[in-house]
Image: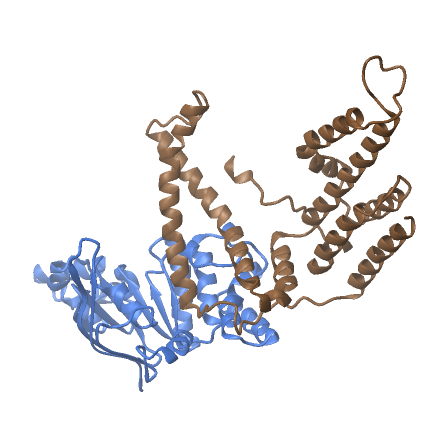
């Protein structure tokens, strides 16, 4: 497998409003493979959103380079190709929907790319079907729920036929059922459509579902690995102000009490299996 | 309560008038308004009445709604009547005592009053039967040929679309802020005009700040979706003229011809 996104020694500095130089990203290197589902975890101000914006050429590195499918983000000629290859979904569903009708909003991306009208129609219908919103094509976005609006935003990116989708805390403003809808959509895109997913989140239970987890702290990627590897290091995660899934914490406590149970249990189902094995 | 505010006065429907191409509707309205100023005497108003009556009947909009659309301009119509009745010089009519009512005045008042009412009714029929989105599309397409002389057709349409999109969002937000301030003891309803206006400040400041924040986020989001102005942009929905659009244009033209012939 080849890397679709390659970030090499990326440094991002900016001048804050009180004239201090802030280093939001400090020498971050990342290789993201085609078809991978990567979750980026981190506290507020850890630099995870800043990193995400580098993958879409919304921000350019102060030092280092970011390549999207081999295209350098600093080269302005590549900008539109990069944004088409790596689509981005933002946190607030209200602030990224442009049109007053659902299907027109989904059409916005391909319209910008200059796609033929009948091809746009086809893409819009397909994208709405993929996110399960085909029945709402003619509705006004402000009557939809948060989860539905976020699925519309995902469909809007999908209609641009991206290879990679970067989601910047897409569930942060949603209620539990909305979060579930969006997470299921994301996972389906990854499994069925083969779209590379980069999910920025601070929810542990969402990160658990990824192939790989990257933990950010003060502009650095301090840990990475499979969810099992990362969440087994409970103390380290807690030291950077992150929590672990409840079952993992339970395992750690049981382990401390001398019960022979592995430390990398992430879901309730796995926990049930492990507990039954104990007898 | 704040949610009930509707945008424009669009009455959704599926009638032939609703389905007309917005470009034709806008052009027909412009032609109709211009031709009203060509009318001399009362007789051609019969044609206008016939034309308007047909549109109203086809659009299935109740006469009550039409009358309602005249209401905001009732003062202007009334003033026009009064000025025309009393200010037109001519043969003074007996029986009104000292009031200088002239025959020409009455004639002129009726003539001007009717023109105004026909004008407003025609214009409101456009907004009553065309959704804001269709209007925006129509305006963009009609202005397209003027792009060469620097008319920002796409930008205007984009601004209108975004404004329409954010009106409900900002209304929701106003409602939320209002409730939050009321929960902390703000009073928006009592006091004189001045103190009520002052009470709006804690409502407007957060609203403006959030509107700017939204604008910033939206700008980022549309940039991420490859928006780069109107150049090389295609549209999913193409406006196509159908048979019904041609017949509507023909009927409007007939009205013009008929009126010009009465002069």
- Residue at the location (47% across, 42% down)? B171
Total labels: the figure holds: 0
Q: Which chain is blue?
A: A
Task: Mark yes or no: residue B227 visible.
Answer: yes
Find the residue positioned furthest to the bottom.
A1
- Residue at the location (49% across, 67% down)? B229
Task: Mark yes or no: residue A133 visible.
Answer: no
- Answer above or below: position of A41 versus B209: below
Q: Is residue B40 left or right of residue A107?
A: right
- Answer above or below: position of B244 versus B105: below
Percent of width and height locating residue A66: 27, 78
Q: Quadrant of residue B49?
A: top right
Colouring convention used in this rendered image of the protein? by chain
Q: Is residue A31 left or right of residue B51?
A: left
A139 or B85, which is in the foreground?
A: B85
- Answer above or below: position of B88 versus A51: above
Percent of width and height locating residue B90: 86, 27
Of the chain colours in the picture, the one used for chain B is brown
Q: Is residue A253 left or right of residue B212?
A: left
Q: Quadrant of residue A41?
A: bottom left
Percent of width and height locating residue A262: 16, 68
Percent of width and height locating residue B17: 76, 53
Q: Quadrant of residue A17?
A: bottom left
- Residue at the location (37% across, 47% down)? B210
B179 or B137, which is in the foreground?
A: B137
A150 or A278, which is in the foreground?
A: A150
A62 or B174, which is in the foreground?
A: A62
């Amino acid at each position: 497998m080849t890397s679709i996104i390659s970030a090499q020694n990326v440094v991002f500095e900016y001048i804050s409003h009180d004239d201090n130089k802030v280093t939001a990203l400090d020498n971050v290197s990342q290789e993201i493979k085609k078809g991978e589902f990567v979750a980026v975890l981190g506290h507020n101000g850890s630099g995870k959103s800043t990193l995400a914006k580098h993958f879409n050429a919304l921000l350019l590195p102060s030092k280092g380079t970011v390549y999207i499918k081999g295209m350098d983000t600093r080269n302005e000629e590549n900008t539109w190709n990069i944004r088409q290859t790596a689509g981005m979904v933002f946190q607030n569903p209200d602030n990224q929907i442009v049109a007053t009708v659902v299907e027109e909003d989904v059409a916005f991306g391909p319209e910008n790319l200059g796609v033929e009208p009948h091809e746009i129609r086809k893409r819009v219908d397909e994208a709405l079907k993929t996110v399960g919103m085909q029945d709402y094509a003619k509705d006004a976005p402000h009557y939809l729920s948060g989860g539905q609006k976020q699925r519309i935003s995902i469909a809007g990116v999908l209609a641009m036929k991206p290879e990679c989708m970067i989601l910047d805390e897409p569930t942060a403003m949603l209620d539990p059922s909305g979060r579930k809808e969006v997470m299921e959509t994301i996972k389906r895109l990854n499994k069925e459509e083969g779209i590379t997913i980069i999910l920025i989140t601070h929810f542990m239970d969402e990160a658990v579902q990824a192939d790989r987890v990257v933990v950010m702290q003060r502009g650095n990627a301090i840990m990475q690995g499979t969810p099992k590897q990362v969440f087994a290091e409970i103390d380290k995660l807690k030291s950077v102000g992150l929590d672990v899934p409840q079952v993992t914490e339970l395992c750690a406590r049981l382990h401390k009490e001398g019960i022979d149970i592995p430390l990398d249990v992430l879901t309730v189902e796995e926990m049930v299996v492990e507990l039954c094995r104990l007898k | 309560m704040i949610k009930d505010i509707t945008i424009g006065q669009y009455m959704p429907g599926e009638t032939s008038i609703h389905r007309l191409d917005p470009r034709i509707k806008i052009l027909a309205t412009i032609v109709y308004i211009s031709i009203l100023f060509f009318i001399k005497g009362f007789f051609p108003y019969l044609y206008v009445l016939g034309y308007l009556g047909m549109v109203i009947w086809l659009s299935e909009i109740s006469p009550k709604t039409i009358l309602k659309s005249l209401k905001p301009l009732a003062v202007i119509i009334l003033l026009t009547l009064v000025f025309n009745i009393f200010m037109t010089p001519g043969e003074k009519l007996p029986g009104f005592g000292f009031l200088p009512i002239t025959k020409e005045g009455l004639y002129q008042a009726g003539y001007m009053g009717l023109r105004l009412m026909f004008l407003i009714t025609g214009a409101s029929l456009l907004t009553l039967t065309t959704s804001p989105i269709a209007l925006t599309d129509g305006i963009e397409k009609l202005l397209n040929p003027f792009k060469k002389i620097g008319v920002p057709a796409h930008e205007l349409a984009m601004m209108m679309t975004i404004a329409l999109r954010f009106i409900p969002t900002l209304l929701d937000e106003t409602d939320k802020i209002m409730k939050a301030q009321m929960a902390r003891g703000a009073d928006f309803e009592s006091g004189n005009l001045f103190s009520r206006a002052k009470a709006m400040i804690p409502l407007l400041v957060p609203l403006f700040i959030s509107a700017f924040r939204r604008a910033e986020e939206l700008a980022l989001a549309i940039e991420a979706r490859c928006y780069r102005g109107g150049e090389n942009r295609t549209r999913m929905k193409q406006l196509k003229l159908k048979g019904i659009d041609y017949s509507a244009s023909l009927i409007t033209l007939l009205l013009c011809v008929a009126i010009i012939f009465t002069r």
